[in-house]
Image: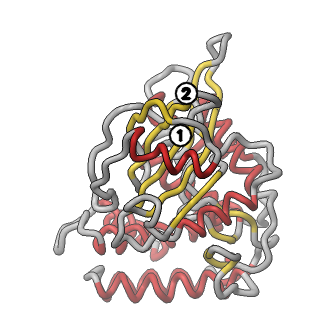
Amino acid sequence: MTEAVAERSYKMPQVDVDTASLAALFGELGLGVPTAVTELIGGGARSFRVDRTDGAPLVLKAFKEEFTYATGKEIYASQLLRDLDVPMTRFLASDESRTRLPFRYTIANYLPGRQVMTFKDEPDVADLYRQMGAMLRKLHTVRVDGYGSFGADGVVNPAATNAEFVDRFFLHGFDRFRHYGGGEALAQQLEAIVADHADIVAYSRGAVFAHDDFQPNNVLAERDARGRLQLTGLLDFGNAKASDPVCDLAKALFCSEHDAPGSGPAIREGYGLIDHPDPDAALWIYLLLHRLTMWWWLRHVGVIREGERHDLIVDLEAMAAKKRA
């Protein structure tokens, strides 16, 4: 993660973190003596690199008090990957009680490198995108019982089938879409498309670990001794869930193309064969799901203003028009 002062967001708490405030905690946890604290850019929380007298640096993440983010969910998600050969965040401690520090926190290993997004203008950045595809494929080898969101102890209210799980998402998504003013006519057109693709979402090889936010801002990289770009770390399991792998791949392509236009084909190349009888149709219908969800979420948090004709609505209208054609 890039070492600089992070911009504030609605998710980020106002906290003071220095070596003095961390000394007792690190001593209690057997993590050595902190010698320097540097804030890091990126993610939905305040993150700090903590250097120590002995051992590699660590990362402390501080979570806003009123933000209903459950650290246990992220820890559970990372534990599912503990035997996977992927450089990633591995948690050493967490506390939701606010008794040791005046905020909720996690402590994890420090991963070298900087966000893949910062390499987007490099001539060989496609190498990173292909590696991202291969990394995502590895994540999808981890099987999970049932489809659903993770909690601290497993999948919450798991769905037995992918069709049931996706139906839940679409039902909630269309309710929120209407609530925030997406438009009744467009909602009905998109609902008809979903109904026509019921056979597409009915097919699934089973629930797997889905990162659900796999994009160039959540993967780190650096150049090796020979100057080649290499991935060095996977971050942020806050959205992780158990879902169909094609659904997660579609989310990765959607988010990556938004942040780094042109990255999609290389990610898909690195991912390899998609286990679905009609992969393009599956990616298309899941893209509709992700666009719908992203639109109402951005309306919910105020990024999209009421009455604003956002690009996501334009994209959803284009999908509806293509179906009609």
Q: Amino acid at mark 1?
A: Ser
Side (left or right) of 293 relative to 236: left
Given residues 289 and 160, the one toward you in this image is 160
Which residue does the image show at 74% across and 84% down from the upper left?
161
Give the number of marks: 2
Query: Does residue 240 appear anywhere in the picture?
Result: yes
Residue that carries the numbered disc 2 in the rendered image:
125
Of 305 and 115, which appears nearest the observer?
A: 115
Q: Secondary structure at mark 2?
A: helix
Q: Which residue is mark 1?
A: 263
**What is the secondary structure assignment of the residue under circle 1?**
loop
The amino acid sitting under disc 2 is Val
Give x and y (percent) for residue 29: 62, 51
Q: Residues within 10 Å of mark 1 (few under 14, many from 20)?
A: many
Looking at the rendering, which quadrant does residue 219 occupy?
top right
Q: Is residue 13 above or below residue 295?
A: above
Label 2 near label 1: C-beta < 8 Å? yes
